[in-house]
Image (cartoon, helix red, strand yellow):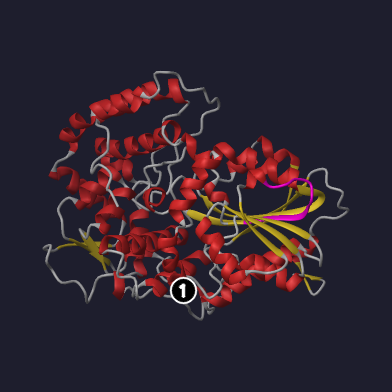
Amino acid sequence: MRRSPRLLTLGPLGLIALCLVAPCFVGLAPPRVGGAHVGVALGCNARTPVVRQAFSAAAPAIPLVGAVLVFFGFQALNTEASDGALKELLQKYTKIQIINVTPDTDLSDVASGVTHRPVLRGKTAKDVHWYARSEKELPPVKWYIRDESVLRRVLFEGGLGLGESYMDGHWDSDDVERLVYELLRIEDQTKELGARELPLIANIILGALRGKLLELPGNTVQGAQENIGRTYDVDTIKIYEQMLDSNMQYSVGYFYQPDMTLDDAQLAKMELIGKKLALKPGMKLLEIGFGFGSLAHFLATKYDVHITAVTLSKAQMEWAKEHYGHPNIDFQYADYRDAPEGQYDRVYSVGMFEHVGRKSFATYFDKVYNCLKDDGIFLLHTLGWAKRGEWNHNAFVGKYIFPGGELPTLYLLTEEFSDQWHLEDFQSLGKCYVQTLRSWLNNLKTWEGMDEFDTRFKRMWEYYLSCCAAAFEKRRTKVWQMVWTKQLSTRLEDCNHIRLVDGKPR
């Protein structure tokens, strides 16, 4: 796996030039300070422009001009004083205890990775979400730094630098998840860094520009095929087989009670979806992005419905056919844009919308509208992003886990394409992902039988699961289930069935 340039930032002069020139060419507004700088860096929160202009011929030169000035900015800010400024901020707002160790120090008894013991279950929510409490009640979390470049990489590269330096073995912690959570405490305090915050802002701008200038093919069918193929391929299927529950659900489990197993929570999630869809025998369903096929199998078996399920992952399609074949299910290798229209009683999508991207949201919703019968129901299950703004394609998860991915924000889901839809139900499940991710890490931590993956790759996965758990605990990232009907639906009632238990309101 090839690393990106180590310190891809802009200096003060480059930042000023980019902020002045970029909006003219790509419709990018100057960002608010306080995006996902030093946490998981799943995205950024530059304000969305009112008018998006077409790219001019000069647009590709913008990042080049900034890159030329990187050297000057780096020389101005790449000093020990930068490390000291970040340390002061951490000391003021977090309970992180920095411990400098030598590269060969043995941390096997105290560090994370295979010795990480996440809290999976408890009698109360306080047991599970134990560190999302008053800061005064918490013990410090230890940050063992092996390489002096770590703090500067975090300061200059944000979450990408934090994640890559962990992959490189340059730091460890007695709890990676909580360390990231503590770092998230300072994301809205970085203004106190003064000029030393500029590289963080520049990183966000470069990430948004990269999405505008270099990632355009990602929303095409071919681009989507390439991105999904990189996320789910034959070589990595065995990771999911060890990491996931017995039903191979690669999405959040419904931990509606603290003392639940992962299998119980995933079954509860599938039952919740079936209830919201109000299924009846013989109905025709379209599933957009079927994962490993178990949800389609569950619904087809329990409700006797007929399902057309599409995916752009050949590896997942073959796996689903082998393990979850069913006479009522037609697994297809196809893009959702090619699905036949006008014949489905229900359309649902779980964990796929994150791959669509804001430029194709309207295309997606319009396609679902045309596929759904007038009295039908559409269920969308998706991750969500807490802060509005342009998406940062310099993020760790986007580079290593979900290439081309983008989490929607609520305001993006209220744009013009939503006018033809009636929102029936909205449920947030984000906190459930904390236990889900911890369970996956617990299942994966031994890496049994996977010697073909090197240490750096394994640490990448461990960091990914830990930092995402912290982001959900902080409510920085979300999970939403939304149920929609058509605005001009022929249905006589709202979807009251969602709020009924045994025919009575709950």
Circle 1: residue type:
Val
Vertical side of 492 occupied by 411: above or below: above
Vertical side of 217 occupied by 303: above or below: below
Near-viewer residue (167 or 162): 167
Left or right: residue 115 compared with residue 301:
left
Near-viewer residue (278 or 187): 278
Q: Position of residue 400 (x, y in %)?
A: 37, 52
**Image point (27%, 33%), residue name:** 10
Near-viewer residue (125 or 290): 290
- Looking at the rendering, which quadrant does residue 4 occupy? top left
Q: Position of residue 348 (x, y in %)?
A: 67, 56
Around disc 1, counting alpha carbons within 10 Å, would you say few (fewer than 14), some (14 to 19), or many (20 or more)? some
Vertical side of 246 occupied by 45: above or below: above
**Image point (40%, 24%), residue name:** 22
Q: Is residue 342 magenta?
A: yes
Q: Position of residue 362 (x, y in %)?
A: 64, 38
Tell me which segment is drawn in magenta.
Answer: 339-349
Q: Examine the rendering and report whether any part of residue 115 can be seen.
A: yes
User: Residue pushed farthest top?
Assistant: 57
Q: Position of residue 363 (x, y in %)?
A: 64, 39
Circle 1 residue: 128
